[in-house]
Each structure stands twice: as C-alpha cells, then as structure tokens.
Amino acid sequence: MRLGLPALALAAVALVLEYAQIGGPTAVFLASALSLIPLAGLLGRATEEAAIYTGPRIGALLNATLGNAAELIITIIALRAGLVDLVKASIAGSIIGNILVVLGLSLLVGGFRNGTQFFDAKTAGTNATMMALAVVSLTIPAVFALGPKETRPSGETISFLSDGLAIVLIVIYALYIFFSLRQESPEAEVREHHGGPTMRLRVALGLMAATTIGIVFMSELLVGAIEPVAEQWGLSELFIGVMLVPLVGNIAEHIVAVQMAYQNKMDLSLGIAIGSGLQIALFVTPVLVWISVLLGNPMTLVFNSYELAGLIGAARIAVLISVDGESNWLEGAQLIALYLMLGISFFFVG
C-alpha cells in the first residue's frame, strides 16, 4: 500500500513529539492531523473493497462504525474526566459536522468532478426521516428542562427521562439497521461498482480494523492538543466542542466520504456521511448516557439552545437535499455555507 509508509512515518513523528514533549501542543496537533490523511486514504481503499463484497450500505455502516469508534473512546475519556458539557457539545458538533461538512464537501467535490450525481432516493429519504427523528428526540429533554418553572420537571426527573429516551433511541437504531439491510437496491449496486475487487474480503476488513486502531491513537493525540492550542487563540469551550473536536476528530471519515463522491459512488458517500451522523445521534449518544452513569458523572440529553439551533437547521436542510435522489455542487456549497454561518455564531458565544 502506497499510503502505508507515510501513515506510519507521520504517526511515529506525532508520537515522538507527544511523549518527548518536543514542539508543544501545536506541533503535536499538526503532526497527528497530517497522519490522519494517509490513514483515511487506507480506510477509504479498504471500505471501497469491502463494499464490493457487501454492498454500499453495509460498507458505509462498517466505515461509520469504525470511524465513530474513535469518537466513542475519546468521549468516554472526557466523561471520566468530568467534561460533560464538552462531550455534549462534541456530540452536537459531530452530527452537525457530518451533515454539513462531510455531506457538503462530498456534494461539492463530486458535483464539480462529475456534474449532477444520482443516488437511491428511497434510502436517502429513509435516512433523512431518521435524522429528523433523531434531532426531535434530542430536543425533548431540553424543552422540558427549559419549560415554565411551575411545570418544569426536577433534575432527577430529567435524568430519568434521558435514560428512558436513550433506550428508545438504541431500539429504533437497531430497527433502522435491520430495515436498511433488508432493503438493498439493485440500482445502487450497479451504480456503485464497475470492476472486481483487488483484495480479499478478510484482507479488506483487516485493513479497516488496523487503520481504525491507528486513527484512534492519532485522534486521541489530536483532540488532546486541541484545547491548549485553541486556548492560545482565545476560543470558548463551546466552540472547541462543537466546531473543532468533531471536525478534526472525524477527519478520516470526512476524507473517505469525499473520496467516494469524487469517484461518483454517491450511495456509499451518502451512507458514510448521513449514516455516521445517525449512528452518533441514535447509538453513540444513548450509550454515552448510560456509560456516564457508570462513571459517576451522569450526562442528560439536555442540549443548550445554541446546539439545538444548529442541529435543527442541519437536519432540515439535509432533508430538503436528500429527497429527490440527485445532487449538484451548489447544494454542497449551501451546506458548507450553513456550517460557516454556525461557526461564526459559535465563535462569539461563551
């Protein structure tokens, strides 16, 4: 693999800078971020090969799951340290980032390269509906917690509400996966694959697992360096959590989805972008709710008004773009424009 040596070399540099304390947080940040690029290339190649055997839906699910494994580990570490607000900001930012940045860049790059692109409208519609459901479910605890004082539930009740919603979210996500895997689209299969595989399935899966382990280590270094680097520039914790941590922590997924769109494999690209956001909202978030209880730092599903505004706006525009089964570069530019507007707004908060 041509990307293997650069990935190993950059990862080694990042580790040396971190543990030898050379160059400070900025050097670690840059080295670990650069190391994720060839690792993402390897993950994208393995995902593409696995999708030839499994189909774009399972391939995208594998990629999203492995990509989100790094974020799950990082957020568990943050919860153990008591950084509950940062974790919730990171969750909101991950969902917003997957919809607006990953999907936006995919549509932009794919549209410039291939013109109007097409994807399975039925699958996209199901994903859009699930994303709207996820965002609505995440607003319910905040509506109760921010309601009038005379009818507002107690903090203990809000905690029980969050625990109950977490169970419902996991169940609906399991049903969504079951439904999706039974709704394979022959048209999508024909559109996605134009040649045979160049590696065996077990090799592709092994490469996905190995690169994911590398991404986990580099992401942990990267996120660990974000806070001191951001503080040097006077950025708030909310901005760090919503904008920076998800953007750089998920850079591998971002590159893979854009790579698939560039190759005109839109079902796989959208499956990674939207599927990853759905997995964060419907699986990772409720799992973190229960893990936080075990760690002694309980986390509720009460997001602040700024985070909810971003989530609702991102979900609405994703639904509008996904329902017609085709995309162009302008739609990608619209998604990125909304992300930039949210970024400017979060910069001035806190």
Image (cartoon, helix red, strand yellow):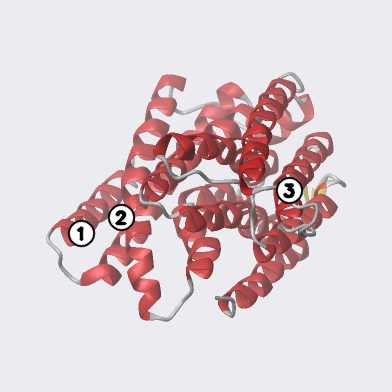
- Residue 269 appears anywhere in the view: no
Q: Residue at x 37, y 60 (%)?
A: 33
Q: Which residue is mark 1?
A: 18
- Label drawn at residue 135: 3
The answer to which of 171 and 180 lies nearer the viewer is 171
Choose top left, top right, bottom left or bottom right for residue 194: top right
Where is residue 55 drawn, in percent x and y?
63, 26
Q: Is residue 155 left or right of residue 32?
A: right
Q: Nearer the viewer, mark 3 or mark 1?
A: 3
Q: Nearer the viewer, mark 3 or mark 2?
A: 3
Position of 289 relative to 306 (above/below): above
Position of 16 relative to 134 (above/below): below
Q: Callout 2 environment at 10 Å: few (<14), some (14 to 19), or many (20+)?
A: many
Can you name the residue that lies furthest to the right here? 324
The answer to which of 78 and 187 lies nearer the viewer is 78
Q: Which residue is mark 2?
A: 221
2 and 1 marks in contact (CB < 8 Å): yes
Q: Is residue 179 left or right of residue 31?
A: right
Q: Is residue 166 left or right of residue 224?
A: right
